[in-house]
Image: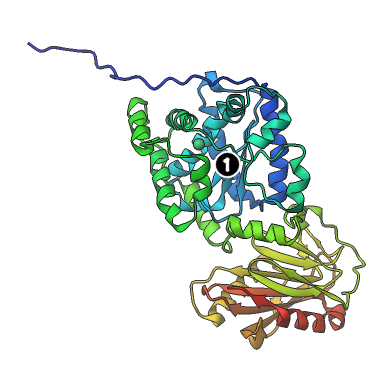
Amino acid sequence: MICTLAVLPLVAQTRITMPKNKYKVQDDIKLGRDASREVARQFPLLNDNQTERYLESVGERLVAAIPPEFQQPAFSYQFDVVNARDINAFALPGGPMYVNRGMIEAARNEGEMAGVMAHEIAHVALRHATAQATKQNSVGNQLGTIGLILGGAIFGGQGGAQLGAIGAQVLQTRYSRDYETQADVLGSQIMANAGYDPRDLANMFRTIEQQSGGGRAPEWLSTHPNPGNRFENINREAGRLNVVSNPRKITPEFRRVQERLSSMPRARTMAEIQRDYQRTGGRNTQTQSPIANGNYSRTVAAPSARTRVYSNSAMSVNIPSNWQDFDTSGQVWFAPEGAYGSEGITHGAMIGAARSNSGNLNQATREYVDQLLQANTYLRQTSNQQRATVAGRTGIATVLSGRSSVTGRNEVVTVYTAQLRSGDLFFVATVSPEEESYRYNSIFRDMVSSIQLND
Ligand SMILES: [Zn+2]
């Protein structure tokens, strides 16, 4: 005789109860909105369309997979990339989420990246930030007090001090262990619903723990403490869920974005970003996007003979005191008013580093100049590589020129290159209309020789 039994899962998926919360849903939204403004002011956002669009598509897939009982129609989930090297991600009440570039680069597949996002989305959907404030502060019910409880990693300095009073320093809750467990469970359920394997969430946590030895992920671990047996518990939950037979792992989009990120100049660490922020007295050069805010003008003031020192964690340089500086995704632009905008700069200089695998200055320079020529089709190379001293090192100068569509005049671009100790290529590209060269040549020479590199 054969005993036939209907096969049922032995254990159902874990049920989650929304934690007690005395705050209104609107309070979550307001806290998150205030804090996200501060994040945009203090953190360098990558602002790369392709990466951003990709992150949003993954985020939207996850948000659509939140179980109906935890969906908050008033929340607006948004996804931004912070151009920082550390493996970190954080979500603010009401939905704004930030994923560090280092997190995307460290993930071994899309599922691992989505896992961290699903975990963060779970914290938001379960309203853990205000729930925790409810637990810790049963007396006061003013929003202002939450800011103190949810103190986070927003930097000090002038900007931070101004903000303190309004209690909007909600950067990141240090979640309790039971909330961590809830976020792991709901995060796993969201992943399974969205076509991912929740085991990738467990794998990513293991990666984060392993990398924290190198000091790359302490922030994430201190705000999301391991509630104990995290890896095993997530895998157990995964066994209770319906995981599709072919979960999303390495997708073409994931591969493209990782390649794109690895071709960009190395991102700063959060510690370096904080140092730079404090050094400039809380004036974040990032929020003023030269691309978004610039306007070209027919008359551009001549470079001031007086100079000022610009410095960040990577270098310092003397620039004319009437030039502004813009830190844009790893490059710094220096230009006077009226000389910057969506087509780059018409007068001034751009300084940065480019990834190089060749270890050979001539070849790395050729590759970099080729990229410049491809991106600026109106330019032609008008000199061979010439020896030059750049930041006290043996370097190369290459001259390009062509008729600029912005000014309608002939433009001269001199590209100075030298090698960084990492093997990457350091570059300075100086730009001016040809007929104004006489005003700029000596300024550019002084600028290039004043550069000090901290590599
Ligand atoms: Zn967490």
Q: Residue at x 56, y 63 (%)?
A: 266
In the picture shown, does residue 263 fall above or below 6? below
Q: Is residue 33 rendered to the left or right of residue 172?
A: right
Q: What is the quadrant of the N terminus in the image?
A: top left
Q: Give residue 299's position: percent from left, percent from top.
A: 92, 67
- Total count of labels: 1
- The residue sitting at the bottom extreme is 387
Residue 300 image point, x, y percent: 90, 68
**SS under mark 1:** strand
How far across and how far down the image is residue 363, in percent? 54, 79
Q: Quadrant of the C terminus?
A: bottom right
Task: Return the residue nearer the eye: 281 or 185.
Answer: 281
- Who's the residue at 58% across and 61% down the image? 264
The residue indicated by pointer 1 is: 90
Q: Residue at x 90, y 74 (%)?
A: 302
Give percent across and percent down for residue 314. Answer: 63, 69
- Residue 110 seen in render: yes
What residue type is disc 1 on?
Phe
Q: Is residue 210 above or below residue 164?
A: below
- Is residue 171 positioned above or below 368 on the image? above
Label 1 crowd (10 A; few <14 / some 14-19 / many >=20): many
Q: Answer with the quarter of the image where residue 193 lies.
A: top left
Of the pair 230 and 395, the residue shown nearer to us: 230
Above-or-below relation of 396 to 255: below
Q: How is the protein colored in the picture?
A: rainbow
Question: Residue 341 sits in which quadrant?
Answer: bottom right
The answer to whether residue 193 of the structure is visible from this angle is no
